[in-house]
Amino acid sequence: MTGDERLLARVATQDRGAFHLLYDQYADAVYRYGLSILRKPHLAEDVLQETMMAVWKGAKSFSGRSKVMTWILGITRNQAHNILRKESKGQRLPAPDPTTAPHDPTQSLHVDLCVQDALGTLSPLHREVMHLVFYENLTVRETAALLGIPTGTVKSRMHHARQALAKELT
Amino acid sequence: MTLCQTVRDWLPWYVSGHLTPNKVGRLAHHIEHCEACQKELARVIQLRHQFVSSVDAAPTPSDRVWETIAPALESAPRSHIDVGSFLIGLNFGIAAHDRRTPVQGDLKVLGRKVRIIGKRRKGA
């Protein structure tokens, strides 16, 4: 059993201290994956909240067939798509909370605007696969399992995503 | 599919260290002799670096998310034990909480729950 699996097993017994540790460990990854899908910081924070509550309630259902990170990213994806569906049906208030928006000027200075702009032009599917492979370092199989697509599709989607991003950056 | 196409599909996982030793060997052998794939490898390395830098530069979640989650955990019992018989429809459950009444017991008769230890709060 890995350290992450032991931590999740403690969360399954409703150990709040363990859950706080797990939150600290995964919050950034969940938030950034949510942000890559939804592109809005306030919605990514909603995804983080919903995902972590789902982890708290569902830790017992972790079967160990995947890594803890991949399992949590799978929950993140479901929550992000739930929010997308509600957004498209107009069931959520679109007003963002201004205090959750990036406001630290020193942080904003470091953002590579060219890359940010280019990422904004990618299709959600391309942005998502690139995030999982380049940022989360998932294998082909892990990415395929998470997205529910064949491994061949992961490779071709990644190929097209690379081409699209490279084209925007040149 | 040509060898160039195959190798180029492997490149993202080569740079992240997820390619099998067999594929790494084939890729290295091919790239040694293929200038176009050498350029493509350099491009993938650069793209990955730009992508990771861009995501890292994004804001991190605010502390308010945890502050919203933490109180919601309090309503869940720390531990819960159920004993009873499914067949005759009787079930006794006891739960330990951090807040409210520390220990609560319920008798469930044919799916209907009756609190027998610990008072039920109004509106709970």
Image: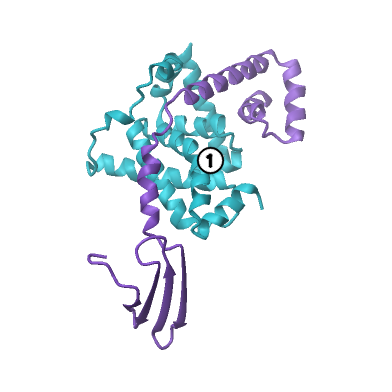
- Under circle 1, the secondary element is helix
Q: Is residue B102 left or right of residue B46?
A: left
Q: Residue at 48% of width from left, 26% of height from top? A: B55
Residue lying furthest bottom in this view? B88
Seen from the viewer's position, the closer of residues B59 and A18 is A18
Specify whether residue A132 is in view.
Answer: yes
Q: Quadrant of residue A37?
A: top left
As displayed, is residue B88 above or below residue B114? Answer: below
Q: Which of the chains is cyan? A: A
Q: Position of residue B118 (x, y in %)?
A: 34, 73
Picture colour for chain B: purple
Which chain does tag 1 point to? A
Q: Residue at 43% of width from left, 83% of height from top? A: B86
In the picture of the structure, the residue carrying the numbered disc 1 is: A25
Residue lying furthest top in this view? A170
Q: Quadrant of residue B19?
A: top right
Q: Amino acid at mark 1?
A: Gln
Q: Position of residue B91 (x, y in %)?
A: 41, 81
